[in-house]
Image (spheres, grey):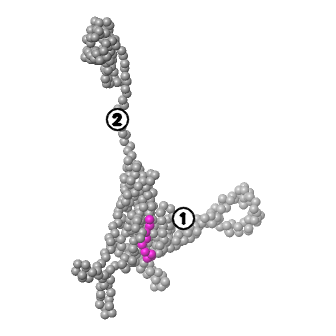
Amino acid sequence: MQKIPVLVVFCLLLAAAAACSTQRKWKQLSAHGTSASLQLPSDARDRASPSTAETLRDTITVRDESGRKLILMRAVKDEATGEMVASDVLDAAVVTARFRHVAERFGTVELEFDISVSDSLQDSRWQLCFTPEMHILADTLQLEPILITGKGFRNAQLRGWQQYERFLLSLARDSLHFVDTRQLEIFLQRNIRDIYRFKTDSSLVSDEQFASAFGVTQQQALEHYTNRFLIRDHVRRMGRKDRMREKWVPHPIQREGIRLDSVIREGEGQFVYRYVQLLHTRPGLKKVDIVLHGSIQDAGTQRYALSDSKPLTFYISSLSGLMEERERYKMQIVERRAEANTSCNIAFSPARSELNPSLGDNAAEFRRIGRLLGSLLENEVFDLDSIEICASSSPEGEERMNARLARSRAERVTAHF
């Protein structure tokens, strides 16, 4: 019967116990639905801690020496009845908002939220990965993840890297590793002593000189003293390179593409990270939703997905939201005023206002006035607004009579045309 060392058996038992402990803890977390929370930053920095709130309560329970339970409460005197009435102070309820209004500044908005991880989610053998996901209009953007790495998980990562580096160092990095240089040197020393001096000669030896001295070329000599078994072994080990990397480094340490990688010890309390993301606004952007995805990776190959957090909503107050690509037109009437003046000489009988076409050149003047009115009415650029007709009389006689005569002549001309 083969005997297994006690130390090996003890290590196997420890590994099995650790695996069972991890599975049991994960089942407990799954049963309670524990996950990280996504919260808006609180503006109240001076809230009392739970331990302080306990001391401020007005009801306490004590036991006397005989074991009896006594409830002590603060009492106040009722002004109406004069009796002592017990009083208690209830803690105020805290309401956590799931949305916030943010304003645009120079084309960007700053989204700020807290990622809170309870101590029940933290384990030295685990690595927690939380990735905020931002929903913008019809797009979905994955933000940089944050990693919370347990001390034991990081030690396992470092040990894996060391094992993998030792494997890489065992690989041949020089082609001379496959050449039996010792046998080649012995052959030259025993059979071609004149050529053996090349060992300590630093002068350059060309292929032609080497071939004339040895009777073979350098390539032929290397191929003759090359160990084919070592080459096959090297090829086989190189083919295992990727497989050994997956074995020893299943969880490589990430250096880029992450927002934070914090190594913590087990039982250090709640972990809170203030996440600040700068976002460039765009036309039509009114709100942004953020959801937190999380997963647990243990030191082995197990991976557990956490339930998504409730979304946070940021409403954007942005001037770019008022922009529209649709063309708009404004109709405006532009007025242009023009005035046309002409003088027509219509003859009237003295002290009379009747029109007489046969008097003087009245017939020709009547035709000229008709042509002028026709051209004004048919004009497509201007609309005819008004026509003013001015008539006069000779200066002899009374002024009031002359004014009435001139007005009567103008009215006769207006009525005629």
Quarter holding the C terminus is top left
- Residue 400 inside the magenta-drawn segment: no
Q: Which one is in front in this view, the residue at disc 2 or the one at disc 1?
A: 2
Q: Where is residue 10 in the image (x, y as percent from the top left)?
A: 46, 83
Q: Residue furthest bottom?
A: 66
Residue located at (36% from left, 37% from top): 329
Which label's residue is closer to the chain start, 2 or 1?
1
Residue highlighted by disc 2: 331
Residue located at (39% from left, 71% from top): 47
Between the C-alphas of marks 2 and 1, the distance is: 79 Å
- Determine the image quadrant of residue 365: top left
- Determine the image quadrant of residue 397: top left
Residue located at (60% from left, 64% from top): 173
Residue located at (29% from left, 6% from top): 359
Query: Which residue range is magenta in the image?
Result: 266-274
As rendered, which of 142 and 300 lies closer to the eye?
142
Query: Looking at the rendered structure, which numbered label has been put on residue 26?
Result: none
Q: Position of residue 55 (x, y in %)?
A: 37, 80
Q: Residue furthest front?
A: 398
Residue highlighted by disc 1: 238
- Determine the image quadrant of residue 375: top left
Three-letter code, disc 1: Met
As rendered, which of 363 and 384 lies closer to the eye?
363
Secondary structure found at label 2 = loop
As rendered, which of 138 and 13 lies closer to the eye?
138
Task: Give the crowd class for mark 2: few <14, some 14-19, many >=20 residues within 10 Å.
Answer: few
Three-letter code, disc 2: Met
Q: Is residue 385 placed above or below 120 in the rendered structure?
A: above
Q: Position of residue 353 (x, y in %)?
A: 26, 12
